[in-house]
Structure formats: structure tokens, C-alpha cells
Amino acid sequence: MENLGALAILLAFCLSIYSVLSSLVGKWRQNPFLIASGRRAVYAIWALVTTASAVLVHALMTSDFRLAYVAQNSNRAMPGVYKFAAWWGGQEGSLLLWSWLLSTYAAVVVWQTRKKHREIMPYVVAVLMTTQCFFLILNAFVAPPFLVLAVGKSITEVADGQGLNPLLQYWTMAIHPPLLYLGYVGFVAPFAFAVGSLITRQPGDAWIQTTRRWTLVTWMFQTAGIILGAAWAYAVLGWGGYWGWDPVENASLLPWITATAFLHSVMMQEKKGMMKVWNMVLISATFFLCIFGTFLTRSGVVSSVHAFAQSPIGKYFVGFLSVGIGATLYLILDRLDYLKSESQLESVLSREASFLFNNLLLLASCFAILWGTLFPVISEAVTGDKISVDAPFFNRVNVPIGLALLLLTGVGPLIAWRRSSLESLKRAFLWPALGGLSLMAILLAAGVRHFYALMSFGLCLFVTWTVVAEFYKGARAIAGRTGKNLLAAMIELTHRNTRRYGGYIVHMGIVLMFVGFTGAAFNKDATYEVTVGDAFRLGAYELRVREVRAGENDNYSWDHAVVDLYKHGTFLGTLEPERQFYKTSGQGVSQVAIRRRLNEDVYLNFASMSEDGKRAVIQAYVFPLVSWIWVGFWVVLGGTLICLVPSKQRFQFSKTETAAIEEKHAAVEN
Amino acid sequence: MKTYTKFAILIAVIIGTLAWLATGGINETKTYYKTISELQQMKAPHGKRIRVGGDVMPGSIRREGRQVTFVLMQDAARLKVVYNGSDPLPDTFKDGAQALADGKLDPSGVFYASKIQAKCASKYEAAPGKPGQRPVYESRGRQASM
């Protein structure tokens, strides 16, 4: 079986090279048969990589411990779902997952466009398959998943495997990597279309419209992957946080930031024909950051809790990245004349300017995070000292950027294109601004002294107000004309322009998430050494330890505490944090106990037993508002899904000023 | 004033502010990664935040109340470490474990750590592997605390 898997990978590798060559040569020689065979090879590659993946999954499910990968990432006692999840539990398997997702995406792209875009498709296929080829090289030669265990020349089998890392045996962790990868891999499609349109000097922004859904869906997966990762860290790692600015977390955030910038700045291109070069740069940056993120996760170049073994895989990624970035840069620079802007910025107070600043801030944040993440590498190269920077650095730069972006979230959608008069600004923003300011004043009077928290709450209300006002105004107009009630009118309104109103809903979700982030300014924590009968206080809560017990099973030994939670003398419930110590891996894992409420979470972590073994060390935390992050995420998800629904009315962007230029382009093309 | 000048000024202000914040952030939180021998040869190490790695010398761990002292070793180099942080030490911290200590070096040559990360060095030795080759997943042991 493992031979079949390895063979399938090798064949897929050969076919990917064939597909690239036949697409390019077919295009060059104008040979439709070669082009078609290049496209069909994509399906064959999908079938082959699927076969290889199926072989690996089969080996995992049947606990075939002759395979090194299975022995390292699975064991007999694991539930079936984690045996399956062990597919992406280790280096080799997760790279195979990457390859498989990529081949699936490529097959879908080729299928969707089988009757469209004849001009650029050969290049799109070539870009997709070059990337595929790179990952198949890794699968076939650098991190092969089908190595068997052998002593001398005979294949051996171990009795039981190492098992999946216990930290990963948790439901969010089982789906977090595939979701994140769906997000990473998906950007290859818009990137391929961008490159294709660049090579063929396509006029206009057809590539953006073709790939709009791709970009949105991919962005959605990425958002879901990042938030799930945060939720996992919160519920499993037991250090009482959801985001630690760990290199691998950063790696997932970087392409998300550039993708978010891209989603906004394409509107400038569609509406005004501006920022064409910029959009090319953004989509390329997003794609390469996705590859870079995989590189960071897989190579262990920056040491991190996530990083896998230091492996030779790094230099392959560096090679692919440098060649890819070099080629893309050359293409963009060579074709600058096709990417000329069709309009100019007219005023600092305009929609254009708000997009510009949105992009500037997002990119600044991206750059700061990249810089901080790579600081150990950069400083070692420059000064010889390996120096790392910590979470405070990232917070210091990104908190103000986040708040400025929140402000733009409120301002951007309402400010006029081209230029805005002070009168219209006053009309749109007077009440929301007053609302935000009065909230800040009230909170200040109530004793909140945290500057950023005050700003954040004020801005959250400001943005909410503008969004609600937009919905209300639009819905009232429809209700007035059609006699529908306000709710039905709102649905009608959203349906008429899903992109705009779905976008507003996404913005609302982001606001809710900011409410959750801001809660972190008021976190409380304390560590107590306690035994049965002890009570301790945390904020308004009183915690009484009812029971501490220990035990063990085949898999792990554990210490368990039962803590009753009271507030002002009222019994609220029981929390049972547990500490598990896995015998085979020698690894400790916390089962934290969380009482989740919308106003605040109470979070208990059984850290360890005290040195004398008589008392339990309990870390207790109160996290105000943290649940709003997860609520906000569902709203973002809903909003994004609405954006994907086609609008009832097709909006043609008026491009009267630019029509002449496009005709000229068309003339050149012909 | 021309529109583009206005933009240029605004952009410069934004980038300037962020650069100022970033520089401050780096200077405040930068931590040097050092081996023990590098640390002992470092010029003016006192007052800098340092992360030093090594193995916990067997039998060197002493506990007095909340304070824990132990010796980190790497080849011939030895470093005395005092830990009195608030977080409990990870389970994996024991004799022979690989440990990372974050803290500052005292002029007396004692390292005062505020955070300890540890991973068990020996736990994978009994694992299956190809003869003559180190098991590839040896360094997959995660640090028990962040």
C-alpha cells in the first residue's frame, strides 16, 4: 500500500511538470491540444494526490505501525477522529494535506473555467501547477510520508505508536489546521489569475471579478482558522490567553492582514480604476506570505511552541519564495504601463483617502508583525546576537493601529467619494461621534482610566451607530415605498446589495471582537496554593475548594480539583480543573475549567501540586468580555456569507470617466 | 496646500508615530538568546534581558519556599540559576531536562530567572527509530508552559 502512495506522489510530481510545460508551450505554439492536455493533467494530479492521501489515512485508521509517520503520530487507543486528524498532526502529513488541498483547488479552478478565460487560463494553470510541483517535491523527496521503519534491511513494526500530541487532541485543534490551510492554499487561485492577467496584459479588472468569490471564501476560511486557533489556545493551553504573538500565530495573521487590505483596495480599482499596481502587489504578497507562513511553521526557523523539528525543508521554501517573488516583481515592473491609475486622489477627506489609510495601517501592522517575528533571525544576521522581542512589542504597535482601523471602519463607508464637504461630514458623523464621546465620558466618570480601553469602547459605539444608522435609513426608505415592516425592509435592503450590507455586518462583527479584545485591559488573575476546605477571592467571586483528588489510568495520571464558585454569597456553579500527565510522552496537559458568560469568564487552571505534594496550585483568572470575540466571529462569518450571495440587482459601476482609456487599452490589445 | 502634500504629511506622521512606538517596544522587550558560554563571555550583560538554555544538572535542584535554585550546564559551562517567579515550574522541569531560563545576570554571576521553560530530554529515547539515526521527533516535545 505504502508503495502505491509513494508512487502516486512521484507520478503526480512528474505530471505537474508536464502540466506546466504543456500549458506554456501550448500557449506559445498556439496548440489547443497541448493546452487541453495541460488542463486535464490537473485532474489526474488531483486523483493521484487523493490516492496518496487515502493510503496515508487508511494506514492511520488501521494503525499500520510499520509506517514511521503512523508510529509517530498515532496510537491504538486514540479515538478514530484523532487518528484521522493525525493526517495533519506531523510534518509529512500536513505537507501532504497542503498538496491535496492545492490539487483540489486547482481542479475546481480548471473545472469552473472550462469554457471561460481561454486567453489567460494556460498561465493560470502554469502558476497553479508550479506551486503544486514545489509541494510535490517536498512530499516526494524532502518529507516523504510513506517511510517504513526498518532494522537493517527488514521492515519492522512497533507494537504501539507515540500517539498524537495530547495538546492536539481537542476538537478545535482537529479542524483548525485544515481550515487554516484552506485559507492559506486558497490564495493561490486569485494570485494565479493576477499573474495570468499580468502576463497577457489584460485590460481592466476582469481577474478581480473572476476571483472575488475565491478571495472572500478563502478569507473566510482563514478568519475561521485563526479564531479557532485562538479559541484552542484559550481553552487548552492553560496560560490564560488566546493570543501570544507566537511566530506561528503571527504567520497565520500576516496573509490575513494583506488579504483584508486587498479586499478593501480592490473596491478602489473597481470603482475608480485606481491602485492597480497596489492590488497586484497585495495579492502577490498575500500568496507569498501564505507560503512563508507554511515555511515558518514547518521549518522551525524561529523557535516557537509550534515549531517542528529543525529540518532541511527551510532552504527549499527560501528557494521557492525568492524565485517566485523575483519573477512576480519583474512581471509587475515590466508591465507598469498597463497598471496606470485612471483617477487621482482629490482630497484628504474622501472615500479614496479612507481606503488609502486603511491599507497603509494594515500594511504597517503586517510589517511590524513580520519584523518582530523575524527579529531573532535579522538581529543574528546583522549584529551576531540572537535577540527576540516579546508580546509587549506587538501590542504596543498593533493596539493603536487596531484603534485607528476601527475609526476608519466607521468613517470609510459613509464618507463621499472624491471629496467630502464639512457639511456632509457633520451630517453623517455628528451624532455617532457625540454618542462615542459621551460613552467615553460616562466610563471615565465610572472610574475607567485605561486610555486605550476608553478609546476602544468609544469607537465601538461610534462604528455601531454609523452602521445601524445606515441600515435604518435604507430600510426606512424601502419600507416607505413598499409598505413592508422595518425588518422585512432590512432584509430586502441587504438582498439588494449584499456586498455592501454584508460588508457592514462583517464590520459589526469586528466591532464585537474589539469589545472582546478590550476586555483584556481588565483581566484579573491570581495564583493560590490551596487544599480542601480553603477559600479564596478573585474580584467579586469567592472560590471554595471542595475536593482535591488524584488518580491515573493507562494513558495518563491526573490531579483534579472541585471548586465551588460563589458571588456575593450566591452559589453559581462548580468548576473542575484537572492536570493530566501523559505517561508515554511525559507531557503535562491542563484541562482548564471555564465558566463562560457574556460579561466575563471565570477560568481556573490546575497548574501543579505544590512541592510537598499536599496542596494544589490553582491559577484563577477573570476575563471580562472575552466571549464577545467568539460572538463577533460568528457575526463576521454570517456577514461574509451574505457577501457571497448574489445581489438582487446587478450594480454596474459607473465608469464614465474611464471608458475612453479602456477603449484605448482594448485597441492596443487588438 | 496641494492635496498630495497633505497626504504626504499625514502618512509621514502615521509612519513616524508607529516607528517611534516600535523602537520603544523593541528596546523595552528585547531578549538576548545565549548559550551559557556565550553569556559568560558577553560584554556588559548586567541589566539585559537574557534567555539562556542548557540541561539541568542532576541533583542540583534546591527548593526553599517559593525560591528554586539549580545549575544549568552545557558541555563544560555551568551557570547557577535562581528562580523566584510567580508561576509554578512546569512538570517537565526535573534533573537532566533541557531548560530555557529567562531573566537577568547578577554581577555575582548568578542568573535570576523570572520564567522557566523545560522539556524532557530523555523521553523519546525508547521510541522507535531507524538504527543509527536520531528519532526525528525528538524536538517535538513542546514546552510545558508558554
Image (tube, coloured by chain):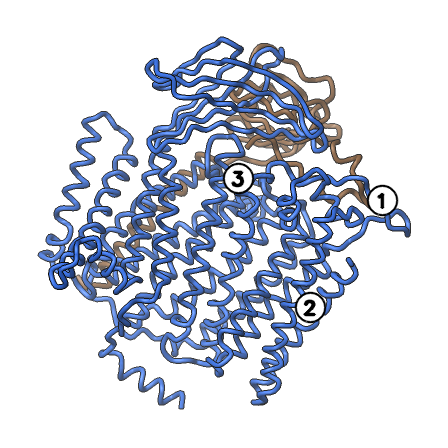
Chain colours: A blue, B brown
Residue A181 sits above or below residue A77 on the image: below
Amino acid type, mark 2: Phe
Residue where numbered disc 2 is placed: A13
Q: Is mark 2 on a helix, strand or loop?
A: helix
Amino acid type, mark 1: Gly
Label 1 chain ID: B
Left-right relation of A315 to A651: right
Q: How much space separates mark 3 and mark 1, taking CA atoms?
A: 35 Å
Residue where numbered disc 3 is placed: A388
Residue sitting at the far top? A533
Residue drawn at 27 percent across, 62 percent down: A495
Amino acid type, mark 3: Ser
**Closer to the camera: disc 1 or disc 2?**
2
Q: Do labels 3 and 1 share a chain?
A: no
Residue where numbered disc 1 is placed: B132
Where does the N terminus of chain A fall, quadrant-wise?
bottom right
